[in-house]
Image: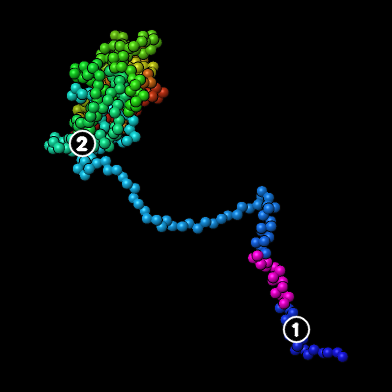
Amino acid sequence: MSTRLSPRLFVSLLLLATAACATDSRAARVPARDTVALAMASAAPRATALAVPVVTLVVQQGDTSARRAATRLRLLTEAEQRVADGLVFAPSVTERFVVAARNKRLLVDVGRVDLDVKQNADVLPIVRRVTARVGPLARVTHVRVHGTWGVETDSIAGYDVWNGRVVAVLATGPATDSLLKRNAPLIGVATRAFPADSASSVPVADTLRAPGRADLPAAPVPPAACVRDSVPVPFAARVGVVRDSLVRWMSDSVKPSYAGAAKLAVRGDTASGCFGAWRAIVVVSIRTPAFDWSEERALLVAPDGKAVSARLRDLRLRTHESLLAFDADGDGIDELAARGLTARMGAQSVLKLDPTTRRFSRFASGFAWETR
């Protein structure tokens, strides 16, 4: 007996079969999550060196703990802080400080004071305490001094104010103290000294020399070495001729570029020392009284009398006078100490020579003053 399906029933069965096939096909194309995890786990042991690393994302969590401010030690009281606001110290990274003899004491310039210390007697003790606590030489007990009189290691006896400058007072040896009592023009450069330097320091008497007198070395100086303060008479006469010639040339040839300038002041200075291949320097400056115009020329003189040009680069300071030569860093080539001047200010400056370019540049500066 044959059974015949109605057309409507046949169409319904056909639609159900098609939907079932589509469901089975989609399941074959999109595997289940469990299937993917199992496949990755089984493939992990067979991963090669070229497999792509798995990146793990970590969710950053906020700090929910209570924050506590770091405890800071208070170095100055409120009264000391008010005084400290009127002091301008040298930067803490400063390595070299100018040393000079002032009022029969050896002083180190460490900064400027903008307070009227003379009118208020209570300010000076506070300035001393503040400088000892937060000054550039705080927690420093000794300094190594290279000066025009020799080399020595001195201790810091205290701090004071001199002519608008904050200074450290040095405790010197007997030989240096005798020079101070005679008001010798001592100029030097100080650096921080450490215990090893103090223990191995050279006694003052071994390197001492008074201005205008020969050195007293501990050992004989080789003939080829440069002997300071020992200039032959003919060479000194030659240096004088070079200075006078340069003064005459600048007086006749160097003039301001504008008309109606005031009377010009011309000054020439010389200093003998060990400047590499040269034994003396001549510096001649010409300027107006108000420093609205100035020019400066420098010459280095060799032992045979030949002069070559040199340059002095000292930032704001335009002209230099009162020259002194000494070795401020122990390299065998002298530095040039000078009184630098510019409009309404001046300072004690120490310049270092570059023998290749014959240029003097600032090595240290201090004891500045201003006129208002």
Secondary element at tag 2: helix
Q: Residue at x 30, y 32 (%)?
A: 139
Instruction: Identify the residue position indicated by label 2 in the image.
Output: 127
Residue 348: x, y in percent? 26, 27
Give amino acid for label 1: Leu
Q: Nearer the viewer, residue 108 or 277?
A: 108
48 left or right, relative to 93: right
Give amino acid for label 2: Val
Residue 199: x, y in percent? 34, 21
**In which quadrant will I find the C terminus?**
top left
Q: Residue at x 32, y 28 (%)?
A: 192
193 left or right, relative to 60: left
Q: Residue at x 65, y 65 (%)?
A: 34
Q: Is residue 4 above or below residue 287?
A: below
Q: Quadrant of residue 294?
A: top left
Residue 45: x, y in percent? 68, 53
Q: Nearer the viewer, residue 260 or 95?
A: 95
Q: Quadrant of residue 285?
A: top left
Query: What's drawn in magenta, residue-wise?
Result: 20-34
Instruction: Identify the residue position indicated by label 1 in the image.
Output: 13
Is the magenta region chiefly helix, strand or loop?
Answer: helix
Residue 260 in sight from this viewpoint:
no
Secondary element at tag 1: helix
Q: Nearer the viewer, residue 328 or 193?
A: 193
Residue 197: x, y in percent? 35, 23
Residue farthest toward the front in the current orientation of the protein:
65
